[in-house]
Image (spheres, rainbow, N blue to C red):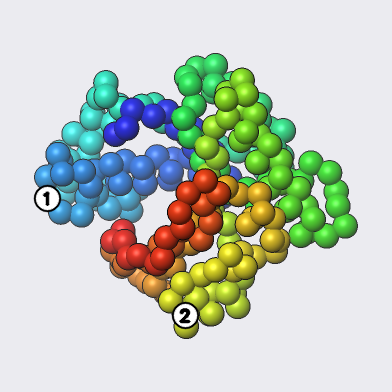
């Protein structure tokens, strides 16, 4: 909607599933009518009703052809890829369009550039490489680079009790809070099976701006 170009790199989820979820989310826009949008599972299994089929076609047509939107490029990251592959992909896609945002799902699954003594050191190396790539991409102009990161089981239990995460909640390495310019915590309901939920968000770190206390979001 903001006219920005986004590269979405996926390791854990196949590209077709990412596309279905993006279209399902796009169908929630008010221009396609009331309701909660399309169910991505119905898209997968071909079980859309007549009205939802119309909504789907309108969604695809708008997503693909609206001149006010930016471009979206979804890339499947091969098994065993490292940050060197991610950098080359960003360079190649950057020749097709100016990149305003790179999303990586997710960094911890990448192969380390070189073998280290512990997993903690390898993950720290990947995070540092991602930060360096973020600041040097786009011919030195940089590009925002976003990736989810797991929390430890103990941190999840503590967050349930306290109602929010803290900077020490991330699993395996403290480099997540050291390298990142912004850290956002998302606390979802435990074992939620519904399509809809209230998620508690929190800006835990913002290097160039204000942090934010927990706030609820409907997703």
Residue carrying label 1: 34
Contact between labelled residues 1 and 2, with CB atoms less than 8 Å apart: no
* Of the two numbered discs 2 and 1 in the rendering, the one whose residue sits closer to the viewer: 2
Residue carrying label 2: 162
Q: Residues within 10 Å of mark 1 (few under 14, many from 20)?
A: few
Determine the residue positioned at 14% across, 39% down. Answer: 31
Determine the residue positioned at 16% across, 49% down. Answer: 49
Q: Position of residue 133 (x, y in %)?
A: 66, 34
Q: Position of residue 66 (x, y in %)?
A: 25, 24
Determine the residue positioned at 51% across, 41% down. Answer: 103
Q: Residue furthest right?
A: 117
Q: CA distance from mark 2 to mark 1?
A: 36 Å
- Specify whether residue 53 is in view: no
Give the answer, above or below, for where 76 lies relative to 118. Answer: above
- Image position of 171 (left or right of 75): right
Give the answer, above or below, for where 57 lies relative to 47. Answer: above
- Position of the N terminus by quadrant: top left
Badge 2 or badge 1: first in the primary sequence:
1
């Amino acid at each position: 909607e903001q006219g920005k170009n986004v590269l979405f790199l996926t390791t854990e989820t196949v590209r077709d599933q990412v596309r279905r979820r993006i279209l399902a989310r796009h169908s929630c826009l008010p221009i396609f009518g009331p309701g909660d949008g399309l169910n991505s599972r119905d898209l997968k299994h071909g079980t859309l009703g007549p009205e939802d089929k119309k909504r789907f076609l309108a969604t695809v047509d708008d997503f693909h052809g609206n001149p006010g939107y930016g471009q979206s490029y979804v890339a499947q990251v091969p098994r065993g890829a490292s940050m060197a592959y991610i950098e080359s992909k960003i360079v190649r896609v950057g020749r097709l369009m100016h990149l305003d945002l790179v999303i990586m799902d997710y960094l911890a699954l990448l192969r380390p550039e070189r073998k280290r003594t512990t997993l903690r050191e390898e993950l720290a190396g990947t995070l540092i490489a991602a930060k360096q790539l973020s600041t040097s991409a786009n011919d030195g102009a940089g590009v925002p680079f976003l990736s989810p990161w797991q929390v430890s089981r103990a941190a999840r239990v503590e967050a349930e009790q306290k109602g929010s995460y803290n900077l020490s909640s991330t699993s395996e390495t403290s480099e997540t809070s050291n390298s990142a310019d912004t850290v956002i915590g998302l606390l979802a309901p435990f074992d939620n099976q519904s399509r809809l939920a209230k998620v508690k968000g929190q800006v835990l770190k913002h290097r160039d701006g204000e942090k934010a206390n927990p706030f609820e979001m409907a997703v």
